[in-house]
Amino acid sequence: MRNKESLIKQKAQVRYLKEGDSSSTFCHVSLTARRMWNTICALWDGSDWDLEEEDIKRKCKKQLLTAQEVVVDND
């Protein structure tokens, strides 16, 4: 299974090198697809799913802010 995944990845890289350049349609389609894969469209908070973009943004920001402890050095 791992060999098959590796082969698919290698074929995609070869195709990108052959067809892709910074101004080509292929490149733009590839970037659009990657952006879609990297999008959070739902968020589980432990009790239910948030599907609205604003709710997801708010909860992500809240989590990041509470995860970062600000240490003030009085020296």
Image: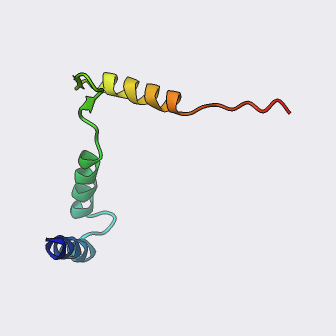
- From the viewer's perspective, tell me whether residue 57 is left or right of residue 8: right
Question: Residue at 17% of width from left, 76% of height from top?
Answer: 3
- From the viewer's perspective, tell me whether residue 64 is left or right of residue 48: right
- Which colour scheme appears in the figure? rainbow
Q: Residue furthest front?
A: 46
| Residue 17 position (above or below residue 37) | below
- Which of these two is toward me, 6 or 31? 6
Task: Report the quarter where the N terminus lies.
Answer: bottom left
Task: Report the quarter where the C terminus lies.
Answer: top right
Residue 2: give x, y in percent of width and height.
Answer: 18, 72
Question: Residue at 38% of width from left, 25% of height from top?
Answer: 59
- Which of these two is toward me, 2 or 6? 2
Q: Residue furthest right?
A: 75
Image quarter for residue 18?
bottom left
Image quarter for residue 16?
bottom left
Residue 15: give x, y in percent of width and height.
Answer: 20, 74
Residue 38: give x, y in percent of width and height.
Answer: 29, 47
- From the viewer's perspective, tell me whether residue 64 is left or right of residue 24: right
Image quarter for residue 43?
top left
| Residue 57 position (above or below residue 40) | above
Question: Residue at 37% of width from left, 28% of height from top?
Answer: 57
| Residue 38 position (above or below residue 62) | below
Residue 64: give x, y in percent of width and height.
Answer: 48, 32
